[in-house]
Image (cartoon, rainbow, N blue to C red):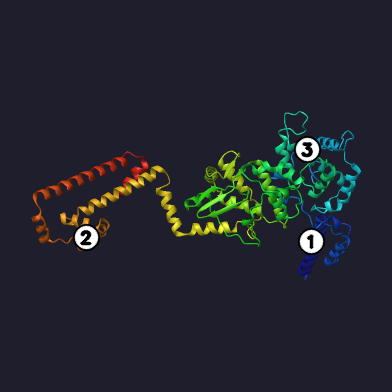
Amino acid sequence: MGRKLTSILIQNICRRKFQSTARRALFHTEPELKNLSLDADSDLAALLEKKLNIEVPTQTGTGASIYRVPDRLRAVEPKAYEPNIVSIGPYHHGAYRLQAMAKTKWDFFRRIFHSTNPNRPNLKQVVDQVKQMEHEARGCYSEELKISSLNFNKIMLIDSCFIIELLKETKELDFRKKSSHIKRWMLPVLQRDLIMLENQIPLFVINKVYELIRCKQESGNLVDLALQFFESMMYKDLDNPKKMDLVVKRDGEISHFLALFRASISPSEALQNKFPVKEPNMFRSVTDLKESGVKVKKAENCQPLDVSFKKGVLKIAPVSMDDYKFTLFRNMVAYEQSHFACKPYVTAYIFFLDRLINAANDIELLHYAGVMQHTLGGNKHAATLVNNLCKEVAGAVDDSYLHNVLWKINCYCNDGWNQKMAKLKYEYFYNVWVSLSTFAAIVLIYLTILQTVAALGDDEARAHIVGNGFWMAIVEAFFVPVKGVSTTTSSSNKDSSSMSADDKFSIDGEQESMDDIGTRIDRFICWFLITSSKEHDELLMIIF
């Protein structure tokens, strides 16, 4: 009885200790519940009900397009998502490492609104327009911005003016002018910073400010200036940059610079799927495709993401890989991973590159095909960097614009005839010397068969070859071990007796000259094979 009471007492102590620990853990993980009163008999449902009553739901805009990069993507390459010299928008505003460009921002702002400017716009009118767009601009950010209305509007206005003046100044930038605020080393860094997902402000804000502050003499629009500014990041290998009117028509309203640039490089309309299509599996590298008979070539007159496959030829738009290009790809992928209103074109493209590239040899083959150039050191390191682009990224399996291309590649590579022809070409005709060796071996075998068939019989057999044809005689020669050689002695003797001595001498002379020619050909072929490279010697050993 005493043991039973002791056991019950221990169980009660353990239960109370567990409840106390759970309450402390709950308070530690959820600070907002600390104000709630708990006792030993508190009910979980009542506790959660109190939490629901005191917690105000966060109001987030449904039209958000500027996101924080997911932590799993940031962990792979943090520097790809953090601006280097300039902050745009509220996410990185006030960062200590970005304060150096604050003076340049203010210089650009003063250039526009200073009293010495003869075309000075109305500052109050511009500020009023920015205030009217505040609510809509805040809705473009995925997170609730804990920033005052005054500071938010100040960021929108000063950053918009900085971007506008930057685009205008770099349009016809002459680095020989000492008055330029933009140094030579700044231009690629600014391009990289202004394309980052977290370093954006709504495009409609910039466009409105541009309309209010530009001079009447200025022609063109903001979109053209922006595309010209970012053109060198992707279009330097192509012949025909896309016209922006087609981009706007296809993708509708563009929310910021990153979305604008992504829309400008989207694949051609012929490659786009109107409805989501599941992507087939394709795990063949460039080396595997070459062994299967697929030729890789550089596409011409195409968009940066265009890929096509027709009659065993895979055409890929040329691309140059460097640190800035990887930053661009990572931010576009982060945007597609967060913004479900856009199709995952870039995501599907980098997964396609990841399948093609498994080793340094794949990079080399793409380089010789004119498809890929890089400034990333060795080919092995370049292959590793390309493969890292897909780390922690959700694939575009259910909605890939490369569905038809991958399906055609699989059909071609799985065809037995294509595999055999590719193996024959890869093993016996992969360079000039091996091709000559193969051709010489075929000629040698041909002459050997000719000599063997001609030697199977006497003059009647040779006459039979002349009468029935060489190839028929070869077919009959294979049946000699089974049927034997049928000879007609009488007809042979008759034909021999009917010949004159001159005819016999003529036949014997022709036979001897043919034998001499065959011997010379055999000696020449043997000499050619023996004096060739090691590959020819191995082939000669196989033949004999």
Residue 305 locus on image (x, y percent)? 63, 50
Q: Is residue 321 left or right of residue 284?
A: right
Q: Earlier in the sequence, mark 3 or mark 2?
A: 3
Which residue is disc 1 drawn over?
18
Amino acid type at circle 2 is Val
Q: Residue at horizontal 41%, vertical 49%?
A: 427
Q: CA distance from mark 3 to mark 2?
A: 92 Å
Q: Nearer the viewer, residue 431 or 97?
A: 431
Q: Where does the image place residue 249, in percent across and percent down from the top left? A: 72, 55
Q: Quick check: 475 above or below 173?
A: below
The N terminus, quarter of image = bottom right
Circle nearer the viewer, 2 or 1: 2
* Nearest-to-viewer mark from 3 and 2: 2
Where residue 531 sits, quadrant-wise, is top left
Q: What kind of element bears circle 3?
A: helix
Q: Tag 2's secondary structure?
A: helix
Mark 2, residue position = 480
Q: Which amino acid, mark 1?
A: Phe
> Measuring 71% from the left and 42% from the top, which residue is drawn there?
228
Tags 2 and 1 touching, CB below 8 Å: no
The residue under label 3 is which amino acid type?
A: Arg
Crowding near the residue tagged with mark 2, few <14, some 14–19, many ≥20 C-alpha atoms within 10 Å: few
Q: Which residue is mark 3?
A: 97
Q: Residues within 10 Å of mark 3 (few under 14, many from 20)?
A: few
Give the CA distance from mark 2 to mark 1. Answer: 97 Å
Residue under the point 9% across and 51% down: 500
Find numbered disc 1 in the image and state the secondary structure of the residue it sits on: helix
